[in-house]
Image (cartoon, rainbow, N blue to C red):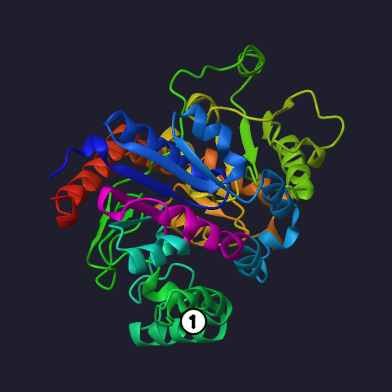
């Protein structure tokens, strides 16, 4: 076995901060353990990668990233997947493959998000040892568990539903572009991309606990779960401005629509009005202040960024979009949450939070000030909900999850014959 200190680890991911930051956290720890770690993702995150001490290859440009999140269809339940495919996944596929192919497969471990298609192709064509990492349970299909169905159906019907979804939507959208690249590389055409191919045949890691999503009999057998990993600057402190606000009154409600959301004007207006209906203080969290009214009520403040691990324990509830990282931070803080899921994995995450009894899902067409105020009041006045939040908060240990994930990776390294 060669010394692991000479091994390269390529971390490959695409998406918003919620998709990238867990990989940065993982990269920091793997680097601390002696590996050479390179992050391959959108050019937009270059400064974050360098701040974490990681090598970096950028895909596209920062302007490309900003243009994509400007597109309102990205968050449409009907059009969002098409936007993701055409504007996010496909343009980076060949450039990412070229970057990966510049490394030596005998001295490199490839670790990628499931929808980073270039990594799957590089594994098949060039022989890179390959781990897929899935941040969300929605990445794992099962005929035995499908939270988004309004009624319980027998497994054979759900299996038939998956076949239809693949044939009429997913493979129809994704397979032509993927197979064009595969053909140029003399690889056979594939289908059932989301039904199996997006999982590594060698190792899959789910970064969520089994009490959040119980492993199912039809999951890939090489799958292991750890728990949530999120980007948390340990030395970051609460600003003086936030400290003054927190100490000036009762615990606030915190509202966020996600770092990549630039079309949340109505969301924030409803949140402001809900606070006023409840007589509660609030914090509006967004890096895009153009979504907010020019003047805010005195007991509601805006911040561009807050360290969740520091501020959420001071909050009474979190209202958000259903990103898995935001969801995990709310669970860790032991506070209830209202989720307004828009698209992608968000509805699945919201359904799981609701099933645990630590929050509720409120669909966009039912999301307004009155309904939001009612849901918040129901949650924060329910002793049962608050006790459940405390119970699940005790189950969260991000340091243990990070260590467990690295141990799985290191065990994978030891079992690779190419490194002998």
Q: Which residues are magenta?
A: 88-116
Query: Circle 1 sits on which residue?
Result: 166
Residue 147 left/right relative to 263: left
Instruction: Judge whether 239 appears above or below 301 on screen.
Output: above
Residue 178 left/right relative to 405: right
Q: Residue at x 16, y 42 (%)?
A: 2
Q: Nearer the viewer, residue 258 or 284?
A: 258
User: Is residue 92 on the magenta stretch?
Assistant: yes
- Determine the secondary structure under disc 1: helix
Q: Is residue 397 visible?
A: no
x, y percent for residue 118: 46, 62
Q: Nearer the viewer, residue 93 or 332?
A: 93
Please rate how many residues cluster around mark 1, counting C-alpha atoms within 10 Å: few if below 14, some from 14 to 19, many from 20: many
User: Is residue 310 on the magenta stretch?
Assistant: no
x, y percent for residue 36: 34, 37
x, y percent for residue 98: 48, 58
Instruction: Judge whether 134 appears above or below 220 on screen.
Output: above
Q: Nearer the viewer, residue 249 or 417?
A: 417
Q: Nearer the viewer, residue 30 or 222?
A: 30
Q: Is residue 278 visible?
A: yes
Instruction: Judge whether 67 appears above or below 8 on screen.
Output: below
Q: Residue at x 34, y 54 (%)?
A: 206
Q: Residue at x 23, y 63 (%)?
A: 222
């Amino acid at each position: 076995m060669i010394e692991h200190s000479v091994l390269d680890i390529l971390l490959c991911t695409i998406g918003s901060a919620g998709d990238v930051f867990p990989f940065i956290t993982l990269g920091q720890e793997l680097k601390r353990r002696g590996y050479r770690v390179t992050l391959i993702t959108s050019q937009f995150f270059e400064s974050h990668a360098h701040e974490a001490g990681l090598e970096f290859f950028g895909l596209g440009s920062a302007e490309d990233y900003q243009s994509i999140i400007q597109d309102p269809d990205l968050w449409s339940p009907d059009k969002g997947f098409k936007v993701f495919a055409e504007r996010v996944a496909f343009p980076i596929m060949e450039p990412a493959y070229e970057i990966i192919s510049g490394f030596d497969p005998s001295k490199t471990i490839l670790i990628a998000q499931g929808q980073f298609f270039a990594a799957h192709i590089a594994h098949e064509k060039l022989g890179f040892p390959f781990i897929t990492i899935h941040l969300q349970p929605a990445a794992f299909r099962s005929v035995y568990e499908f939270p988004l169905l309004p009624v319980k159906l027998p497994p054979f019907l759900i299996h038939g539903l998956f076949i239809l979804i693949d044939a009429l939507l997913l493979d129809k959208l994704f397979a032509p572009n993927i197979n064009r690249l595969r053909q140029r590389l003399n690889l056979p055409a594939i289908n059932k991309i989301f039904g199996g191919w997006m999982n590594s045949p060698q190792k899959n890691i789910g970064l969520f606990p089994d009490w959040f999503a119980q492993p199912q009999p039809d999951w890939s057998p090489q799958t292991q779960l750890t728990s949530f990993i999120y980007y948390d600057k340990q030395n970051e402190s609460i600003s003086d401005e936030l400290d003054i606000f927190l100490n000036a009154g009762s615990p606030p409600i915190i509202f966020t629509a996600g770092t990549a959301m630039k079309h949340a004007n109505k969301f924030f207006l409803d949140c402001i009005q809900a606070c006023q209906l409840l007589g509660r203080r609030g914090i509006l969290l967004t890096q895009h202040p153009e979504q907010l009214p020019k003047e805010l009520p005195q007991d509601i403040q805006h911040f561009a960024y807050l360290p969740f691990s520091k501020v959420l324990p001071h909050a009474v509830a979190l209202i958000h979009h259903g990103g898995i990282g935001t969801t995990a931070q709310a669970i860790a803080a032991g506070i209830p949450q209202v989720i307004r899921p828009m698209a992608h994995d968000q509805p699945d995450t919201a359904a799981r939070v609701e099933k645990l009894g630590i929050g509720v899902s409120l669909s966009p067409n039912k999301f307004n000030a009155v309904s939001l105020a009612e849901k918040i009041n129901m949650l924060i006045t329910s002793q049962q909900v608050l006790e459940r939040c405390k119970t699940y908060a005790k189950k969260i240990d991000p340091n243990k999850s990070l260590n467990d994930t690295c141990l799985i990776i290191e065990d994978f390294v030891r079992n690779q014959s190419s490194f002998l």
